[in-house]
Amino acid sequence: MSGILFLISAPSGSGKSTLVDQLRRLVKNLEFSVSYTTRPPRGSELEAREYHFIGREEFQRMIDGGEFLEYADVFGNYYGTARKSLSDAFSKGRDLLLDIDVQGASQVRAKIPDAVTIFLMPPSPEILAMRLRNRSRAEGAVQEEIIRRRLARARAEIENYREYDYILVNDILDRAVGEMAAIVAAERMHRNDGPQTADDEELLAKAEQCRQRNSEARIRPVLQAFGVVNAEAAPV
């Protein structure tokens, strides 16, 4: 039970950080990669907890040194995942979870095709806008132009949902955390043959319901709310 790379992507404000925090309390032997960024900390964010906060010159030095598994420029700031996080986790016999945007996930999939990919959707643009405004207030100011940009980016990111193995909708946090935990458990079982209990079968069934091909009915209202093209034609 080791060596599985899990990628989770979501639009900013979807509640991904909260979900990941709760998942890490529930699931054993799951390392979390703390990404690097050139943006300044927000609110109560701490170094090495939410991100490693570094300057652009240091980030560029790491790019030049080939130290990143992936990196991207998002709204004028760099974000990246160090290769070392992957090797460190696997050397300890643990799986690794990356909190990563759509650009980064695409880069990692190209390098590690057997990575397990999960996309977390907000329930609607209205709820996402509310979450973004609440976060902005907590950080000291609400800037409507930034919120509009993030909503537009969210729509563009959601259009990439077909590239992911599993789809979650973060309408009820406890349910989303339970589904995420089931996905981790199911992927571990798929890679490790052995007897399965009734609880194992229940986890496998819950994870299977979250597979992209089985999520059409649940995600169609979200796709339509965000105006994603061909929402009616989402694949079964």
Image: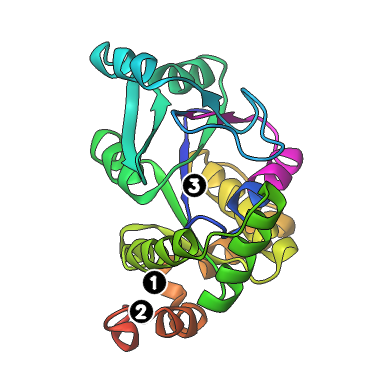
Q: Amino acid at mark 3?
A: His
Closest to the observer: 35 or 115?
A: 35
Which residue in the structure is indicated by mark 1?
A: 213
Q: Quick check: 127 above or below 133?
A: below
Three-letter amino acid code at the position of disc 2: Val
Instruction: Give the residue displayed 71% in from the left and 63% down from the top.
Output: 173
Quarter of the figure that contains the N terminus: top right
Q: Is residue 206 left or right of residue 235?
A: right
* Among the two numbered marks 2 and 3 on one chain, the one whose residue lies closer to the N terminus: 3
Chain part drawn in magenta: 20-36
Q: Position of residue 113 (x, y in %)?
A: 29, 41
Left or right relative to 11: residue 205 = right
Please name whichever residue, 84 or 145, is drawn nearer the observer in this view of the structure: 145
Report crowding for label 2: few under 14, some 14 to 19, many 20 or more residues within 10 A (C-alpha): few
Q: Is residue 35 visible?
A: yes
Above or below: residue 193 compared with residue 158: above
Q: CA distance from mark 3 to mark 1?
A: 18 Å
Question: Residue shown at 43%/46% (left/top)?
Answer: 116
Task: Return the x and y of residue 190 as percentages of the image width and height.
Answer: 49, 47
* Residue 15 occupies quadrant: bottom right
Spatial CA distance of label 1 from label 2 is 5 Å
Q: Is residue 194 above or below residue 199?
A: above
Judge by depth and name the residue closer to the eye, 153 or 183. 153
Q: Are marks 1 and 2 in contact (CB under 8 Å)?
A: yes
